[in-house]
Image (spheres, rainbow, N blue to C red):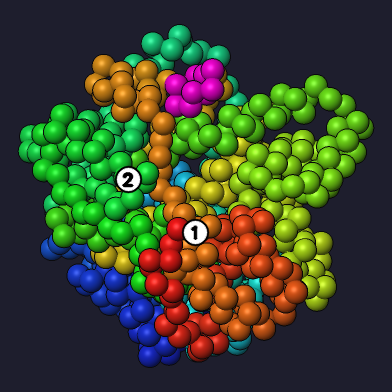
Amino acid sequence: MCGLTGIVTNDGRAPERAALDAMNTVQAHRGPDQHDLVVLPGAGLAHRRLTILDPSSGEQPMTSKDGRYTLVYNGEIYNYRDLNVELGAAGYTFPGHCDTDTLLAAWKHWGPTCVEHLRGMFAFAVWDSVEQRLFMARDRLGIKPLYYGFAADGDLLFGSELKTLMAHPGLRRDLEPQALEGYLALGYVPEPYAIFRNTYKLPAGHTVSWRKGEPAPSTTPYWDVNFEQRTDQGDDSVVAEELHGRLDDAVRMRLVADVPLGAFLSGGVDSSAVVSLMAGASNDPVKTCAIGFDHKEFDESDYARRIAQQFGTDHREHQIAAQEFGLIDKLIDVYDEPFADSSALPTYRVCQLARREVKVALSGDGGDENFAGYRRYRLHQNESRVRARIPSSLRKPLFGLLGRIYPKLDWAPRVMRARTTFQAMAMDTAEAYCHSVSVIPQDVREALYSSAFKKQLSGFRTRDLFRAHGKNAGSDHPLSVAQYLDFKTWLPGGILTKVDRASMAHGLEVRVPLLDHQFVTWAAGLRPEQKLYRGEGKHVLKKAFEPTLPRDILYRQKKGFSVPLADWFRGPLRKAGEYALHDSELARCGVFKPRVLKRIWAQHLSGKRDHGPTLWSLLMLSRFLDREAGQLQPMKLDSLSNTR
């Protein structure tokens, strides 16, 4: 795992070495083992390396023998040995045993279509010194990140993290309104947006090409997940057996490393399944690590300990306080953009723990998206069934009216859930799913936004992004549409961003076998009822591991990590929230109506409304804005004893 960055000039000149070096230095955490840069007419490329395979070779930037192509690359190509055989038959030789050599040969042999031959996680850039053209690609699921954008003078900048672009003196840091709307809706900035204007994330499964004189780069998709059902499936027992074999293959491919390797173990279905397969494929005890919490309602370490004992793993466990407020400003630096998933706190800590023992860790990420593990899938499917029975000419005005009236009734969690359901029933499938996953509901955002900011948005709302994605799902089944939307938004923008930044902050590589693209393609074609059956998610996945894992591990209710945000803002985070909404850059930036910020704060403190998730998103945004303005001061906290 590594970090890459570079500059392509708009006039063919060689970029400044000092600027390129500064961009590479800020991502040193991604590759503490080796670093180098190359400056050429028209472009400069730089790299930081975390050595996983063949430490004696594979240094980057890597240039072809004829000097035409220069490559920088971040990731792992798991089928590189098979590709070496195929490319070797075509006359290519490989001086080392590193997949970087394979990728460069694949580029020379196949050109842009080389991505279709790769099985793994990757982001890479190739500079063609003859055509003076840059080509970049990102893996199919978006496991590895890639940002790009333009400096004020027209030079193209790119890098593994936004901070590499931010290190260039020519990058303007004006907020992108649509990115900010996406963040406030979802708690993260969705692809293809980045928080600054003229900066972008290369979407998962896409390539992009650019040379001087051309307009803004256009991205090209080369892969997408398709939820069209296959007709050649057997019954559940047959599918479960095939699932087990396919996942075992994906896990075994990810056990190749020349450094210590282990796994995250939460005690849930996904991580337990991965650890069980690792144990079956390894002669030595698997190194596992788990995080426990000092609040019993969040703690799942007992389940992780049971799985570790069952499979004889070399287990490490660390307990952390649920109230890790000291990490909030650290996360601003780690994520570059505002990021409001509170589970980033324990994710950062578990990566820190794992790095003490291993350099590579396998995780269970992707199981919920593949096999409908989230509770929201069941709710969305139930709502969609009712929605389908009522003509839209009646449904939209009726439930729209109920959604507007219901907030006027006396508040209670039950009432708020009903209000949310009424609002969703008035919407189409994609918009309803956007509504269900929104951290700050659209009506609350509309009330918060100033007239000036609404004008900047030019009518754009995050629902438009969901509607555009929803047309490409390959199925109109509501569960499949919801899963597809998560693959396009939540998975790359939330889950994988969270894990990549938290792990690479500690020089740790995380591999995700449940997101092997061949496995994902196969799982997407299963019947919806094989995933969500009688209200139980991950149906066929659990069937596949019934012979291996304890039943109470498979069928217990998942806790996940959540934090008592409502109590935090009435207790230890009260001063921080007060400052964020009334005195910080957020209160002065012109995006929000000050009177509405004050009303939300007063409603929360009084207990009339629970605005915890909204306040957390606003707090993280305020810390980001304060940092950008050079006004970031240590947070003021109330005594922890004030927490209710």
Name the residue tied to disc 1.
Answer: 567
Name the residue tied to disc 2.
Answer: 296
Kind of residue indicated by mark 2: Lys
Nearest the eye: 176 or 122: 176
Answer whether residue 537 is magenta in the image.
Answer: yes
Tell me: residue 600, above or below residue 485. below
- Residue in view at x 11 percent, y 43 percent: 314
Tell me: residue 31, above or below residue 535. below
Is residue 600 something one can see in this rendering? yes
- Label 1, secondary structure: give it: helix
Q: On the rendered structure, is 546 left or right of 644?
A: left
Q: Which residues are magenta?
A: 530-539
Quadrant for residue 153, please give it: bottom right
**How far separated are the C-alphas under marks 1 and 2?**
16 Å
Tell me: residue 345, above or below residue 527. below
Kindly report the secondary structure that dominates the magenta region of the rendered protein.
Answer: loop
- Residue in view at x 32 percent, y 45 percent: 296
Of the 4 image quadrants, the one containing the C terminus is: bottom left
Give the crowd class for mark 1: few <14, some 14-19, many >=20 residues within 10 Å. Answer: some
The x, y position of residue 90, in whole percent, is 31, 45
